[in-house]
Amino acid sequence: MITALLAVLAIGTYLYAVRLYRLRFPDRSFSPWRVAAFCAGTLIIAAALSPPLDVLADRRFSMHMVQHIALTLVGPPLLLLGAPLLLLVAVPPARLARRVTSFAHSGFGQALFAPLTGWIVFVAVLWAAHFSPLYQTALESPPVHVLEHVLFLTAAFLFWGAIVQIGFVPRAVPFPARMLYVFLTIPQGAFLGLAIYASRGVMYPHYAQTLSPGFALADQQNAGAVMWIAGGLFMFIAFMCTGAAWAASERMTTDLMVPKT
């Protein structure tokens, strides 16, 4: 219930900010597709954190992996496609906007939003969450479970912020670097999924206690396959979309440079 209310509040605030942006800058377009992407991303994150998926994730490792993919690879990039950072600096009073931009351009902000920081944090959280006591502890402790989700979302937004760069960006990243950034991430999810799939025993006692040993191991293999295949698919889509955006940017630059006759 709380998650649903937060999602409604987020979407309502966003739509109000879009309306103010269009009133303040009537000569600038704000695509309906961006609005749709933000709303879709918010709803996907909310659905991942709500029943029935959140309940199933507590019982099945494969469903937990679906939840993690929604929180790291699907929801955040869609949300960022809605250009919320642009609204954050364009709609509020100038004093608040200056504080946001000053933080983003400070030494700490530049280090925080650096691509290397996002990549390291994302990969570290991805592996640590599945190959450390954090996962088992999160299954047994609701507060730790919430902390785990916060870690996933924070790492995801830092990671995707270097790829989905629309409107105001804390730190600009050229397209070749973005392509390399995504390319180097694809094997991480694949190796993680393969490691889980190939494990000969049930990795987490929680599932061994709630499911039969054979079913728990089969479900664990399904979880590995989800990360390996579905996770790799989403990263490949991100790679291709980044390449398409690069090509579109190059065409736009060429069109501006060619004189009209």
Image (cartoon, helix red, strand yellow):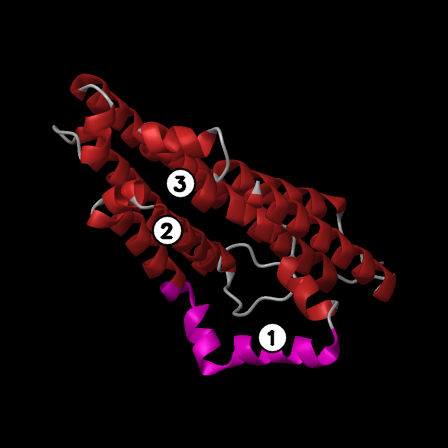
Residue wearing tag 1: 100
Residue 148 horizontal side relative to residue 49, left or right? left
Please report the residue visible at 73 percent of the width from the left and 68 percent of the height from the top: 90
Label 3 vs label 2: CA separation?
Answer: 17 Å
Mark 3 surroundings: few (<14), some (14-19) or many (≥20) residues within 10 A: many
Q: Is residue 110 above or below residue 12?
A: below
Label 1 vs label 2: CA separation?
Answer: 30 Å
Residue 94 is inside the magenta segment? yes
Q: Looking at the image, do the residues carrying marks 3 and 2 touch, with CB atoms under 8 Å apart? A: no
Q: Looking at the image, do the residues carrying marks 1 and 2 touch, with CB atoms under 8 Å apart? A: no
Give the number of the disc on residue 143: 2
Residue 6, image x and y in percent?
60, 49
Where, quadrant-wise, is the N terminus in this rendering? top right
Q: Amino acid at mark 2?
A: Pro
Callout 2: SS = helix
Callout 1: SS = helix
Please report the residue visible at 70 percent of the width from the left and 54 percent of the height from the top: 14
Q: The magenta stretch spans which residues?
A: 93-117
Mark 1 surroundings: few (<14), some (14-19) or many (≥20) residues within 10 A: some
Q: Amino acid at mark 1?
A: Val
Give the number of the disc on residue 68: 3
Q: Is residue 200 above or below residue 245?
A: above
In this view, the mark in front (3 or 2): 2
Instruction: Place residue 206 in its image quadrant.
Output: top left
